[in-house]
Image (cartoon, rainbow, N blue to C red):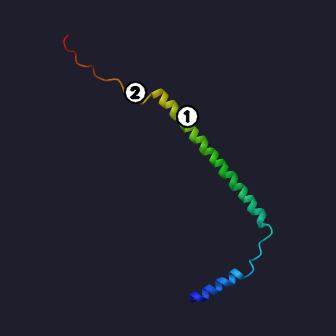
Amino acid sequence: MSRRDREVAARQIMEGRPPPVPPDLYVEVVRRGGRMLRRRQAARRLMWLLLIAAVLVFSVWAATVQPWVVPPSQTTPPVNGW
């Protein structure tokens, strides 16, 4: 099939009448779309909840451990002139 034949076939398909859509297809599409939206919304809420929980856990850990404070020395300094 040459390029010209493919172009003619494509134009015939585009100019032709579209195939009929089953009448119950719209109801099914709306039902599935609603389910997809609810799932996305639930996933989004779960992600926000996990993010808030992670920030809260990190804040409590940082407040109790205080990783920015220098740990105390494990050895005593030398004593001179005693």
Above or below for 3 versus 50: below
Q: Position of residue 55 (x, y in %)?
A: 54, 37
Image quarter where the C terminus lies is top left
Secondary structure at badge 2 equals: loop
- Please provide percent x and percent y for residue 14: 69, 80
Assess disc 1: are there few (<14), some (14-19) or many (≥20) residues with their C-alpha within 10 Å of its C-alpha: few
State left or right for residue 59 relative to residue 18.
left
Query: Which mark, by number, is residue 69?
Result: 2
How many angstroms separate mark 2 from mark 1 (CA)? 20 Å
Q: Earlier in the sequence, mark 2 or mark 1?
A: 1
Other-residue count near label 2 (Cα within 10 Å), few / some / many at <14 / 14–19 / ≥20: few
Label 1 belongs to which residue?
56
> Mark 1 belongs to which amino acid?
Leu
62 relative position to 23: left or right:
left
Residue drawn where x is 45% and y is 28% of the image: 65
Q: Residue at x 61, y 41 (%)?
A: 49
**Residue in the picture at 49% in, 31% down:** 61
Q: Quadrant of residue 76?
A: top left
Up-down relation of residue 36 to residue 78 (above or below): below
Q: Looking at the image, which residue sits at the far left?
A: 81
